[in-house]
Image (spheres, helix red, strand yellow):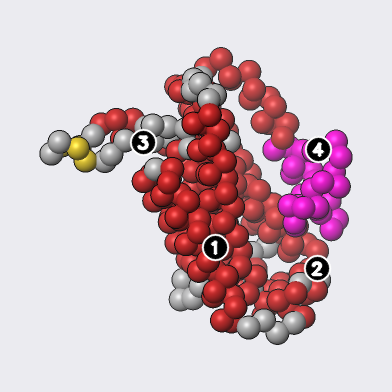
Amino acid sequence: PGLLFAIAVYRTAIDLQLISQVLLGFVSATLLVSANYVINEFLDADFDKYHPLKKSRVAVVRVVEPSVIFLMYAILAMGGLAIGWMISFKFFFTGGLLLIMGMIYNVRPFRSKERVYLDVLSESVNNPIRFAMGWFMVTPAVGLYMDNRWDLEFFDSLPPLSIMLAYWMGGAFLMATKRFAEYRVIGNAEMAGLYRRSFRYYTENSLLISMFFYAISCAFFLGIFLIKNRIEMLISFPFFALLFAWYLKIGLLKNSPVQGKEKLWTRKWFM
């Protein structure tokens, strides 16, 4: 989405240079996200065994050598950053931030995924980070400090704060809905707490209320962005409202497919 919004705002011409940057950007982003998932799967193995679906994952049922995991992580992370450097400093820096948030989310002593509400917010902050990576595939590569002064073009090329906050809150809505579905499918508060420590403090009601907060916040910041940047796109607002309502409907289903993004493909009309 960051890529598409940047093209819309800057009205960028589609040429070979843009196409090559987009391809490199997607490869870099894929490697960096994969690095985060490598440590996520490995460090979650002791907890996923308490989940009725995740207990069959490879890292749970087999012994995985830590040295192999760390080597995989290093190769994926360094490869993603190296390719990101070829695009621009802004893309490279944002890619590094994605790796840092992966560490904060998964690795102790931080391991924010175990902290109530912070688990949702610290995971979904990857959404605006990935949004910025798409944005920086398009925007011109300008320096932060040039000719002994701050380069204002650098700041002008950053994505608007309103759309970043909207995308963060939208991601938080999706993640809270996933937590809600997981909590219901486990069906046992004590077992849920063993799977995810934050579940010791959640209830169905508190998760549901947080979902409404994130959805309303997303709509608010999205409206600010559209009014300031592309007011003609306000006509798309009912579509976003339908999208959120439909996703909520799916999230309330028994054994909801929102627990895993790949299962959403089973909802034919939603897709």
Q: Give the residue type at disc 1.
A: Leu
Mark 4 belongs to which amino acid?
Answer: Phe
Give whichever of discs 1 and 2 has the lower sequence position: 2
Residue 22 x/y as whole percent: 54, 38
CB of mark 1 within 8 Å of CB of mark 2?
A: no
Residue at 68% x, 24% y is 238
Q: Which residue is mark 3?
A: 141
Residue 193 x %, y %: 67, 74
Residue 110 sits above or below residue 270 on the image? below
Q: Are marks 2 and 4 in contact (CB under 8 Å)?
A: no
Number of marks: 4
Query: Which badge, 3 or 4, comes first in the chain's sequence?
Result: 3
**Image: magenta residue range:** 244-271
Q: Which is more N-terminal, label 4 or label 2? A: 2
Closer to viewer: mark 2 or mark 3: 3
Reading the image, the residue beneath label 4 is 270
| SS type, badge 3 | loop
Residue ID for mark 2: 53
Q: Calculate the distance from the C-alpha at mark 2 to the C-alpha at mark 3.
A: 45 Å
Q: Residues within 10 Å of mark 3 (few under 14, many from 20)?
A: some
Q: Quick one: label 1 or label 3, which is nearer the N terminus?
A: 1
